[in-house]
Image (spheres, rainbow, N blue to C red):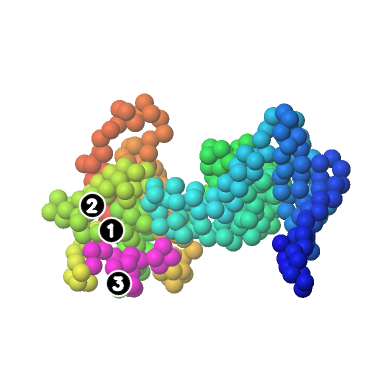
Amino acid sequence: MKSTSNGLSQPKEKQRRVSLGDGLMRLERPGGTSSWVCRVQSDGVRRDFGLGSCQKVSLAQAREMTQEIRSQIETGVDPHVERRKRRAVPTFKDAAVTTYEIHSKTWRNGKHHAQWMRTMELYAFPHIGKFKVDQITGPMIRDLLAEIWLAKPETARRVRQRIGAVLDWAYASGYRETDAPMRAITKGLPRQPRRDNHFAAMPYEDVPAFIQRLRERESFSRLALEFAIFTAARSGEVRGATWSEFDLEKGLWKLSKDRMKAYREHVVPLTRRPLRIVERCARLRIKGCDLVFPGMRRNRPLSDQTLTKLLREMGEPYTAHGFRSSFRDWVSEETNHPSDVAEAALAHTVANKVEAAYRRGNLLEKRRLMMEDWANYCDGRKR
């Protein structure tokens, strides 16, 4: 209690409650602040629920919140428990970070690591990042995808898939009552232009002349591209090749399953020309670097765009990956080598499980003969 000038105490000012009906009250404090309170009675017990400051929550919002609390009480739901649940529900951005941390542990492609979160930061977080995952609706997702659906179709499909992965995690973790409505969302978007899934491939008839032109250059990127052509390997496998993977005496390049797209160990028989390329790289080897085809930065491989840049400098519209198609077309149209041997050389998985069970060998010697024929063809020599 406060003291007056004559030494007598005066009563402390009390806060005032103003009833607005249906259990909603405005609590007015002596300092001039006020807040909303919802009062309900259940099983003879009176309970008060704070709804927030009157300066931040409108009367209409307070009435709506009051009605929600009363409905929960009537159906046997404890509003305090529901509030605790809502506070624990992560935002979409926080859920995306968690989903990334869980799934990225199994990703082997460094480029995928960088792109996954980057696309979310550019296209998803600005629209739904601050919303809790149980508040994300189909129309919200559709609207953000619509902005890039036709302009950047491939990116839009990836963003859709990644949003779906985040909401699936939220559903599995108990933060959403339903899983992501991704199929319905796609139905609500316009049809995208038909895409060509094939990499631009040089006609195999043009490969021998191209290789002669390629050999006029001297760089690690030239050596890497020629090596990729002669081995029919993926460019990422070539760019990441290390010295420990090679057995030059046996003429073998052994790639661990961690380096392969299908996550299966792969052995490549090396013909004379690839062996010479590796020997050339050994003479150029940078001290302390384990990479056979190093990039400009120390102990870093060639970037994924380096080989494409080389092709563009030579006036070619094709991709490094497309030479695998050139090789496959050559096998089909110019040789009698079996299809399964060609597929094994490309490290393709066998779709038919029964066939895969009967063909567990790597067909190494048959592949060696086929790659010798391919090398002779690329060098312009007849078998």
Q: Is residue 178 visible?
A: no
Q: Which mark is residue 298?
A: 3
Tag nearer the camera, 1 or 2 = 1
In percent of width and height, residue 271 lies at 22, 53
Asked whether the beta carbons under mark 1 and mark 2 sit within 8 Å of each other, the answer is: yes
Give the magenta range. Answer: 289-307
Q: Quadrant of the N terminus?
A: bottom right
Q: Residue at x 68, y 33 (%)?
A: 77
| Three-letter code for the amino acid on which mark 2 is drawn | Trp
- Whichever of labels 1 and 2 marks the residue nearer the N terminus, that label is 1
Q: CA distance from mark 1 to mark 2?
A: 9 Å
Q: Residue at x 33, y 72 (%)?
A: 297
Residue, disc 2? 253
Q: CA distance from mark 3 to mark 1?
A: 15 Å
Q: Residue at x 77, y 59 (%)?
A: 11
Which secondary structure type mostly characterizes the magenta part of the structure?
Answer: loop
Q: Is residue 304 visible?
A: yes
| Three-letter code for the amino acid on which mark 1 is drawn | Ala
Residue, disc 1? 241
- As for residue 150 lying within the magenta part, the answer is no
